[in-house]
Structures are given as C-alpha cells and as structure tokens.
Image (tube, grey):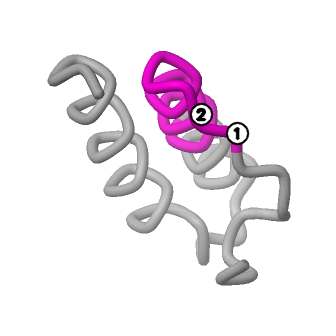
C-alpha cells in the first residue's frame, strides 16, 4: 500500500461523510467528489473501488 493512496482514501472518506446527508445539489456533488477521491486512492493501492451508493454503509 502506498502512503499517497491511503491519504487519498482517507481524505475522500472524510469529505464523503461530511456531505453525504445534505439535500442540496452542492452537497451531493461534494459527496461524490469525496467518493471519487476515495476510489482513486483505493485503485492506487490495488483495491476494488467502492461501487455502492454513498451513505448506504456497504
């Protein structure tokens, strides 16, 4: 695992968690940006990207 990948995954997780419950389009956009960053870090570390809907806990 790379440190850079782990940092991206952690930062994406935090951003996703902060905005996932917002109802505004801006909140949903930021939650998706967090999901994308998280997946980018997971891919760098050789893990499969998360494919479930943000906020489902799966």
* Marks 2 and 1 in Cβ contact (< 8 Å): yes
Q: x and y percent of residue 26 in the render?
A: 63, 44
Q: What is the quadrant of residue 33 in the picture?
A: top right
Region rendered in magenta: 34-49
Is 35 within the magenta?
A: yes
* Residue furthest out toward the bottom: 57
Dot 2, crowdedness within 10 Å: few (<14), some or many (≥20)? Answer: many
Please state the horizontal and vertical placement of residue 15, each as a whole percent of the image: 38, 50
Bin the neighbour count of mark 1 within 10 Å (Cα to Cα): few under 14, some 14-19, many 20 and up: some
Q: Is residue 27 left or right of residue 1?
A: right
State whether the magenta stretch is mostly helix, strand or loop: helix
Give the SS element for disc 1. loop
At x 58%, y 50%, the residue is 31
Q: Quadrant of the C terminus?
A: bottom right
Q: Residue at x 50, y 41 (%)?
A: 34
Per the rendering, the mark at residue 3 is none
Whichever of labels 2 and 1 marks the residue nearer the N terminus, that label is 2
Identify the element where label 2 is drawn.
helix
Residue identifier under label 2: 39
Residue positioned most to the right = 52
Rendering coords of residue 22 (x, y %): 60, 71
* Quadrant of image for the N terminus: top left
Question: How far apart, in angstroms, are the residues tagged by discs 2 and 1?
Answer: 5 Å
**What residue does disc 1 label?**
49
């Amino acid at each position: 695992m790379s440190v850079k990948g782990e940092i991206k995954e952690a930062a994406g997780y935090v951003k996703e968690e902060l905005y996932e419950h917002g109802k505004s389009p801006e909140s949903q956009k930021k939650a998706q940006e967090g999901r994308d960053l998280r997946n980018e870090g997971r891919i760098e570390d050789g893990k499969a990207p998360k494919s479930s809907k943000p906020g489902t806990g799966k």
